[in-house]
Image (cartoon, rainbow, N blue to C red):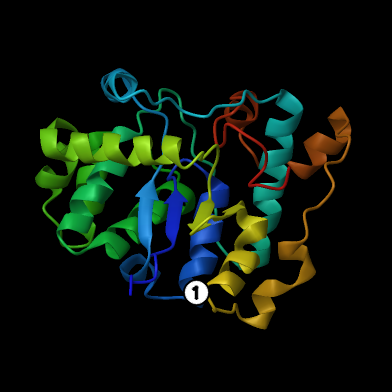
Amino acid sequence: MKPAPRPRVFFSFRSPFSWMAIERLLRAAPDAMDEMTFIPFWEPDPATAEAMLQRGAVLHYAAMSKAKHLYILQDTKRLAKALGLPMQWPVDVRPWWEPSHLAWLKARRLGRAREFYAAVVAARWHRAENISEPDVVRAIAASVGLDGDALAGAVDDPEIRAEGVDCLVQAYEDDIFGVPFFRLRHERFWGVDRLPLFLDAIGCREDAALTASRLIAPLPEPALTASATDDALADVPAAVRERIGAYDVDATGGCG
């Protein structure tokens, strides 16, 4: 008899919806990173993109409008508040996602995937640190007792680079077009709002307090007038408002 397939969880340090969905997943299933296959997903740098092309893979990408970007900022603020998560807004001026995601792959090899993951999301979403900087990744690694130089140097490790390409090729072959994305056999669940259905499929349950309708049901995208947007996003830095697609490259967390 074949063993039951491991659920696959595609996540990204870039996306606030990924951050909140994985937070909820780990609250419901604390051993998820050991019992499921976690696969990082990010926009590749030129070297990674070229390696993907050589294997016939690209990102399944959709451009984003300014209206959708502003809605994402509003929705992120609302969901973080509902989950009781502190949040500061990172400003990604020249994002380079390899340092953080490849360092996570290195941490997983060392058996420290969850600790390093938690440290990265805290740095990015609680303290607004620039996780594109290798020095920031070095400090994050050191904060959880890992070799900072080794993890920050993962971008120059050919084996880790190749593993990163494998992850993005897997995402291409699995038709992953956004995060968070969950797969169980042939079933696919896209977005933070589909997490309860994924948990049902794997026989797990969230705490009732987290399954309130305000967290699960997709909320209608309002027609945001200038004044309404200003009121809803009063604490969002102007630089963040103007960086269209800075946090996600597709619809809001799977609610589309």
In which image quadrant can residue 116 be found? Answer: bottom left
- SS label for mark 1: helix
In the picture provided, is 23 more to the left or to the right than 221?
left
Q: Residue at x 58, y 25 (%)?
A: 243
Neighbourhood count class around disc 1 (C-alpha, 10 Å): few under 14, some 14–19, many 20 upward: some
Q: Residue at x 25, y 43 (%)?
A: 137
Which of the two residues, 202 or 28, is positioned nearer the viewer here? Answer: 202
What residue is at 71 percent from the left and 64 percent from the top?
215
Query: Does any portion of residue 132 appear in the rendered image?
Result: no
Mark 1, residue position: 27
Judging depth in this view, the residue of 73 and 239 nearest the camera is 73
For this orientation, the residue located farthest to the front is 1
Left or right: residue 9 versus residue 145 is right
- What's under tag 1, amino acid-wise? Arg
Image quadrant occupied by the N terminus: bottom left
134 shown above or below 5: above
Q: Which residue appears at 36% of the width and 35% of the height? A: 169
Q: Looking at the picture, how far across and down is residue 80, in whole percent? A: 62, 58
Task: Say which quarter of the image contains residue 161.
Answer: top left
**What is the quadrant of the C terminus in the image?**
top right
* Side (left or right) of 163 relative to 64: left
Q: Nearer the viewer, residue 191 or 27?
A: 191
Task: Decide if residue 18 is in sight here.
Answer: yes
